[in-house]
Image (cartoon, rainbow, N blue to C red):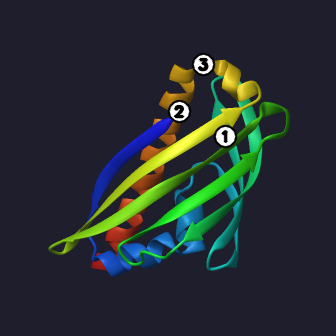
């Protein structure tokens, strides 16, 4: 499954980039995030509770960041396991483009799922994934814009 979108954030690119690398901000933005631990600038560990249709599961996973293109963007890859519910793995390309005093954050993500959640149907999974990514980026945009103004 592929997802892509872009949002406009009322903050300069360097502020947006720093926020994308701040575990506290990310923890607050990730829907269902119980814990987010930064082991190094490139490695994060997360525990997230998600409800997808009738299936509710706690996922534990790791995310690796490739910051080669910083501050224009970065690539991330990750994998999460939800026990009997199944697994999810994927990656995303994130680009940050300055537009005057604002930043356009664009992303393209690929997600592969397996196990019980994969049996729920692609429309339900795609709808849930789009809703969760929308919640993340809406909240992220609010936090970064507030910090930039304040």
Q: Residue furthest right?
A: 84
Q: Quadrant of the C terminus?
A: bottom left
Mark 1, other Cα within 10 Å: few <14 / some 14–19 / many ≥20: some
Mark 2, other Cα within 10 Å: few <14 / some 14–19 / many ≥20: some
Task: Residue under label 2, please give it.
Answer: 128
Point out the tag, 2 or 3, that comes first from the N-terminus: 3
Asked if residue 21 lies left or right of residue 72, the reply is right
Task: Residue under label 3, please give it.
Answer: 121
Looking at the image, which residue is at 60% across and 63% down?
27
x, y percentage for residue 7? 30, 54
Q: Is residue 36 visible?
A: no
Looking at the image, which residue is at 52% across and 58% down?
29
Residues at discs 1 and 2 in contact (Cβ within 8 Å)? yes
CA gap between label 1 and label 2 equals: 10 Å
CA gap between label 1 and label 3 equals: 16 Å
Point out the tag, 1 or 2, that comes first from the N-terminus: 1
Tell which of 141 and 103 is nearer to you.
103
CA gap between label 2 and label 3 equals: 11 Å
Point out the tag, 1 or 3, that comes first from the N-terminus: 1
Residues at discs 2 and 3 in contact (Cβ within 8 Å)? no
Task: Residue under label 1, please give it.
Answer: 50
């Amino acid at each position: 499954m592929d997802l892509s979108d872009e949002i406009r954030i009322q903050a300069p690119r360097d502020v947006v980039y720093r926020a994308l690398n701040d575990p506290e901000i990310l923890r607050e933005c990730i829907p269902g995030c119980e814990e987010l631990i930064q082991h190094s600038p490139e490695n994060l560990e997360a525990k997230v509770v998600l409800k997808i249709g009738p299936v509710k599961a706690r996922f534990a996973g790791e995310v690796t960041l490739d910051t080669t293109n910083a501050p224009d963007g970065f690539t991330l890859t990750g994998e999460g396991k939800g026990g009997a519910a199944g697994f999810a793995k994927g990656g995303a390309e994130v680009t940050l483009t300055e537009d005057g005093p604002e930043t356009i954050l664009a992303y393209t993500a690929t997600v592969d799922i397996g196990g019980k959640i994969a049996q729920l149907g692609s429309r339900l999974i795609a709808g849930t994934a789009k809703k969760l990514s929308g919640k993340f980026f809406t909240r992220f945009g609010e936090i970064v814009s507030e910090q930039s103004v304040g």
